[in-house]
Image (spheres, rainbow, N blue to C red):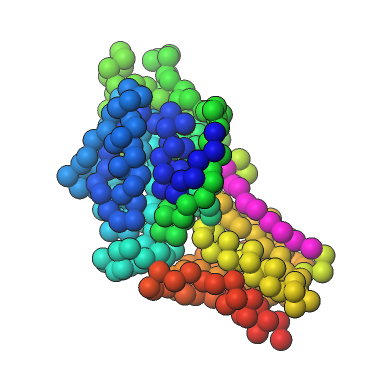
Amino acid sequence: MRMLISGNIACAEGALKAGCRFYAGYPITPSSEIMEYMAMKLPKLGGIFFQAEDEISAINTIIGASWGGLKSMTATSGPGFSLMQEGLGYAIMTETPLVVVNVMRVGPATGQATKSAQGDLMQARWGRHGDQQLVVLAPSSPQECLDLTVKAFNISEGLRAPVIVLSDEIIGHMRETVEIPEYVKIVDRRIAEDLSKPPFHSDNPRETPPMPIIGRGLSIMVTGSTHDEWGLRDTRGFETHFKLVRRLIDKIKLNAEKVFEYEKYNTENSTVGFVSFGSVARSVKGAVKILRGKGVEAAYVNLKTLWPIVDDPIIEMAERVKAIIVPEMNMGQLVWDVERIVKNRCIVVSLSKVGGGEPIYPSEIAAKALEVIK
């Protein structure tokens, strides 16, 4: 089935297709349409919708629903995402699968509530205190909003970890034709059937332990404090904490190849390259066409997974071009990763633009490329 829908509605459709049956949230521009759509659709599918009193309540409610056995989700924007960070840290520590959609807007603080930006990238990766990692996906079209939300649920269930879908206002409110498949590939939760095995331990660092469900015969402590493989608190021992955090990080890092997704265009004659994500990736494609018309071949890597990043496609491009430009609707965040990956293989140039909701236009990106290569 094909529908003309916005990126926000596509996110909601993707969540429903993936089996989401619990949504808790608080309305905030520019993500509110996701909440409104889930409120309308979930009850008809036997699911539960809950309007929380704030974003802190929302994140903690979906944690509880997940432990009750339901695939759970919330959506928000800048200030709400900030309020959810402690809950996300708890979800990481307790290995709770859930999905958070952040439709980015201009900040800091209230900023420009209805305008688009990409300033939440570093917060999505590292916003929690302590050593931790999670998966961050970034759609660049309404179709990818649907597809990557499905993928977010599958990764979350497979790794027993929170997954962030990092959209932005342009993508969230853009309307395009979206293909909504009748069936999608779904990864269902591995339920702990053998209650004699510890619920927070895996011999294989790439695999996560099956998840026990509250009320099914196992007395278990679900705590955000340092705990052993049975969930028992140990807030003093070095070995317990190091072993736990090492495993929580390894299950993300060692599965990077499985969760990493990107789109690339690269030719042997490329002079300049681009690395981008989200709505800016669409402008990059327009810039490549402009440059080709001026006799300049350009390459690009559009990151659909912002964390963890696999370096290879960026390195491959860096070894062919003279310069890589990183256009972002922020003051420069992704560029730091590109500089780390590229090292001395070529020049890396940041192109920042934020405020007023204006996109980075293809003509601006092309002009910057011509300036750099001259």
Query: Is residue 217 shown above or below 231?
Result: above
Report whether 221 appears left or right of 269: left
Report whether 98 appears left or right of 366: left
Query: Is residue 273 shown above or below 120?
Result: below
Q: Quadrant of residue 120?
A: bottom left
Residue at 34% across, 56% down = 30
Q: Toward the viewer: 156 or 7?
A: 7
Q: Which residues are magenta?
A: 259-267
Report whether 66 appears left or right of 315: left
Residue at 27% across, 53% down = 28
Residue at 75% across, 74% down = 293
Residue 114 position within the rendered picture, expressed as x and y whole percent measured from the top left: 33, 63
Report whether 153 appears left or right of 27: right
Q: Quadrant of residue 53?
A: top left
Q: Quadrant of residue 337?
A: bottom right
Is residue 56 in view from this perspective? no
Is residue 356 in view from this perspective? yes
